[in-house]
Amino acid sequence: MPTNGYFSSERDKAIIDAGGFFCEACLVGKPASKASPDPRYCQGCYEFLLKEAEMLPGNKRPKWIPKPQKAPKKQYQVSQHGDGIMSTVEGKKIEVDIINPPDAIRTSTKRGPKHRQLPEDLIRQLASEGMGSKVIAARLKAEHGIIVSYKTIQRILSGERKQLALPMSAP
């Protein structure tokens, strides 16, 4: 159904196919010569909307406010030394290869504090005398200079913590 009025989808399609664009404010096809810095609007609508945006109160910036087209992103050259280690700057996700240290440097894969040798025989002897784990921890610190958590002593007494015992004489 052809129309002789302002809107005509056939005319707009022909203008766009010829290298023009569709103005989102006028809602019609426009030739490329009437383009503005914002690819959504023709030059006339761009100038009008900029004046309207100046009258807006506050710091709100609605999406319809014209903005100049962004400059193309810079492309960086990646040296050949890093080709196998990192992806390019333009990639969606920067990935880094995980390089494991030599076996001589790697000590343990477990997290947390490393187990120390503790006088388990002395701890068991003090526990058999009726001392609690907190008292044993305080006594080891005072008499032998061994700082150990009462929780570690509880683990030793319950058999959860297995390690070599450090020979130590009883007081």
Image: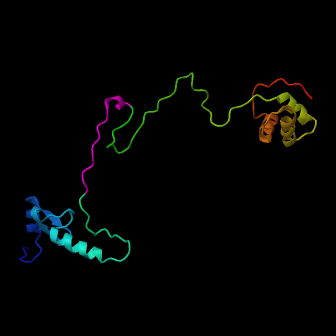
Q: Is residue 81 magenta?
A: yes
User: Between 99 and 14, which is closer to the camera in this rendering?
Assistant: 99
All told, the count of numbered labels is: 0
Residue 2, compared with residue 119, is above or below; it is below
Identify the image quadrant of residue 10. Answer: bottom left
Q: Position of residue 24 (x, y in %)?
A: 20, 68
Residue 154 on image: x %, y %: 80, 39
Q: Quadrant of the C terminus?
A: top right
Give the side of residue 8 with respect to residue 45, left or right: left
| Viewer-side residue, 168 vs 72 | 72
Q: Main secondary structure of the magenta part?
A: loop
Position of residue 155 in the picture relative to residue 113 (left or right): right
Is residue 45 found left or right of 121 in the rendered image?
A: left
Which residue does the image show at 38% across and 43% down from the upper left?
93
Q: Position of residue 36 (x, y in %)?
A: 17, 64
Q: Quadrant of residue 167?
A: top right
Asked if 63 appears above or below 55 in the picture, the reply is above
Residue 54 in the image: x percent, y percent?
Answer: 29, 74
Residue at 57% across / 21% down in the picture? 104
Q: Residue furthest top?
A: 104
Give the magenta-colored segment's residue range.
Answer: 70-84
Please report the residue visible at 35 percent of the width from the left and 29 percent of the height from the top.
Answer: 81
> Quick one: 111 or 66, which is closer to the camera?
66
The image quadrant where one finds the N terminus is: bottom left
Q: Is residue 14 magenta?
A: no
